[in-house]
Image (cartoon, rainbow, N blue to C red):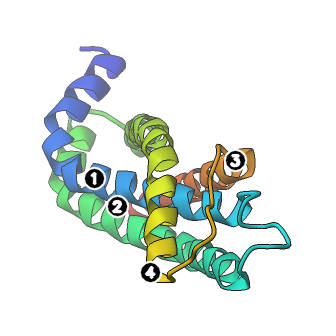
Amino acid sequence: MTFNQLILKNLRKNIKHYGMFLFSLLISIILYFSFSTLKYSNSINNSDSSTIIKNGATIGATILFIIIVVFLMYANHLFIKRRTQEFALFQLIGLTRSNILRMLCIEQLTIFLITGVLGVMIGIFGSQLLLYIASKLMHLTIKLTISFEPMALSLTLLLLIIAFTLILFQSYIFL
């Protein structure tokens, strides 16, 4: 069995364990992208818009960024802890710690790419829903529309890169 086959088999075997992590990562990306879209939307950030929405979107996106990174690191720590025996078995059959870390890196990269693409696609529609809910809660009579914002995509990608890097660093320390 080659190393790539081992990675694919291991990823398929652990997909049920990754389920909650995948779901939480997907929801996190959707929420963050939606808040970032609200933050950078031209219909909200113009001179006629309410400052409550502008400030709320900015504060919400910042707090959400911190919460998501901390939550993902915590979820990854639990997942890595659960797989301790599996890693010991891999070391017993001859894999080095760097091979195990490389395997984790490939697994995490796959998960982050899939959930990142799905999260942004769903987040485009989620931002419309979030704006609708916010405008109904604040009883706004202004008609606001949202379009795709490249800056929101950039910030979401930054969130994913930071979370991925911190999770890899956390996995390295654990191993």
Q: CA distance from mark 1 to mark 2?
A: 13 Å
Looking at this view, name the residue that lies furthest to the right.
47
Near mark 2 (Cα within 10 A), the count class, few <14, some 14-19 or many ≥20, is some
Q: Are marks 4 and 3 in contact (CB under 8 Å)?
A: no
Q: Earlier in the sequence, mark 3 or mark 1?
A: 1
Residue type at numbered disc 2: Asn
Label 3 sits on a secondary structure element that is: loop
On the image, numbered disc 2 is attached to which residue? 76
Task: Reply above or below: 65 against 31.
Answer: below
* Mark nearer the viewer, 1 or 2: 1
Q: Earlier in the sequence, mark 4 or mark 1?
A: 1
User: Which residue is pictured at 30% across the width and 49% down the height?
Assistant: 22
Determine whether the residue tagged by mark 1 lies in a helix, strand or loop: helix
Q: Nearer the viewer, residue 38 or 139?
A: 139
Q: Which x, y percent locates residue 147?
A: 65, 45
Q: Badges 4 and 1: C-beta atoms under 8 Å apart?
A: no
Could you say whether the residue bearing mark 2 is in a helix, strand or loop?
helix
Can you identify the residue that label 1 sits on? 23
